[in-house]
Amino acid sequence: MPQFYETKTMKFYTNTLQNGIRVIHHPSPSPVAHCGIIINVGSRDEKEDEHGIAHFIEHILFKGTKKRKTYHILSRIDDVGGELNAYTTKEETSIFATFLKEDFNRAIELLHDITFNSIFPQKEIVKEKEVIIDEINSYKDNPSELIIDDFEEFLYPNDPIGRNILGTPETIKRFNQSDITEFIKNNYHTDQIVICTVGEATPKKIFKTFDKYFADIPYNPRKTVRKAPSIYIPKRKNVTLDTFQSHITLGNRAFDINHPEKTTMLLLNNLLGGPGMNSRLNMALREKSGIAYNIESIYAPYSGTGVFTIYFGTDKENIERSIKIVTRELKKIREKKLGKIQLHNAQRQLKGQIAIANENKENLMLSIGKSYMLYNRVDTLEDICKKIDRITAADILEVANKVLNPDDLSYLIYQ
């Protein structure tokens, strides 16, 4: 039975089909609308010999259905000025579209077709293997991106969550039609699928359309749970690469998606190395010392675990000096409480960044869908802001000492 709830700033309409697929719609007055299918499956759910198949499927979904060839799939939205896209992460696969509001039905029907009626033609499988191997090789040419993935593998050795999303040329070459259909059968569970929409359409129309295209999909609930990660042992590794610049990552395992201190960790991460040019690490390494150009910290919460990473690039002769500056900043944030003004400014900055990101309706649609998939609810902007405002300087100090303990930090260096 469709349900409705609203906050001061947002309205949501939700429904659950008999097969377990959940639907959430946020009405938004605009000539442009957005729709996506988010599936709670990613590279973490692959077996060792399936490494890269979740991402491979995301590509091959666009290569032919029971009634459409590749050209017809791509043209279906492009012909009306819209955009069709997809992505794969370690724990989710998303297929989504942006289009004019009058094309809601067209977009929903197409997303249903490519997600549930793809036939994975053999000739397309062969072609796409080469495309993805080229993508893997391109990635290897970018050490600043490669080291982030390698660092997670460093933190989770011989663990599915540590493996990169793209796979390897060896595993990609082995995939066949049977492997693809088997992975989908075993992992595309209806109770782990959310359809999310943002746009100017009545809930009655939206739910009627969803029921038309998705109600007949057989009930297929998830019966297993994700494997808990292996025991963490901090370590340091230096890798020699033929590059002009050295690349350094350091970090630790952190809080998972359900941890009560997750929001505090988000604020701590933003304070240290978020997108703001006034982050502590950017000010220390770039503005004051002039020895690094790219500096960032990343907090990625997953199911049952999480990762905190600091990345920066510098000249080889500045590696140890840079690490000393970073560890000095980490020591400060572990030992000295933020003042009231510092805390207030940090909270305002994070709230502002989230609010601006939500102005992008495609981002908002995907955020709503992911939240509903994970928590069966949506944290609105006002909910998130309240959580951020409740964080104290003592909370940040406590989290910093849990995650940034120098004895628990691992280092991976390309030089």
Image (tube, helix red, strand yellow):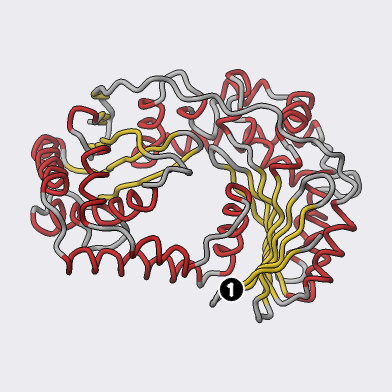
Q: Is residue 198 left or right of residue 379?
A: right
- Residue 172's place in the image compared with 357, above or below, is above
Which of the two residues, 9 or 363, is positioned nearer the viewer here? 9
Q: Is residue 377 left or right of residue 193?
A: left
Above or below residue 386? Residue 87 is: above
Q: Residue 223 at x, y = what percent? A: 71, 28
Residue at left offset 65%, top offset 55%: 85
Residue 247 visible to the viewer: no
Q: Which residue is found at the position 79% from the left and 24% from the top?
A: 178
Quarter of the image containing the N terminus? bottom right
Q: Label 1 sits on what residue type?
A: Met
Question: Is 386 left, or right, of 32 in this rendering?
Answer: left
Image side of residue 136 versus residue 275, left or right = right
Element at label 1? loop
Can you identify the residue that label 1 sits on? 10
Q: Quadrant of the C terminus?
A: top left
Q: Is residue 286 visible?
A: yes
Q: Position of residue 162 (x, y in %)?
A: 45, 28
Quarter residue 122 falls in: top right
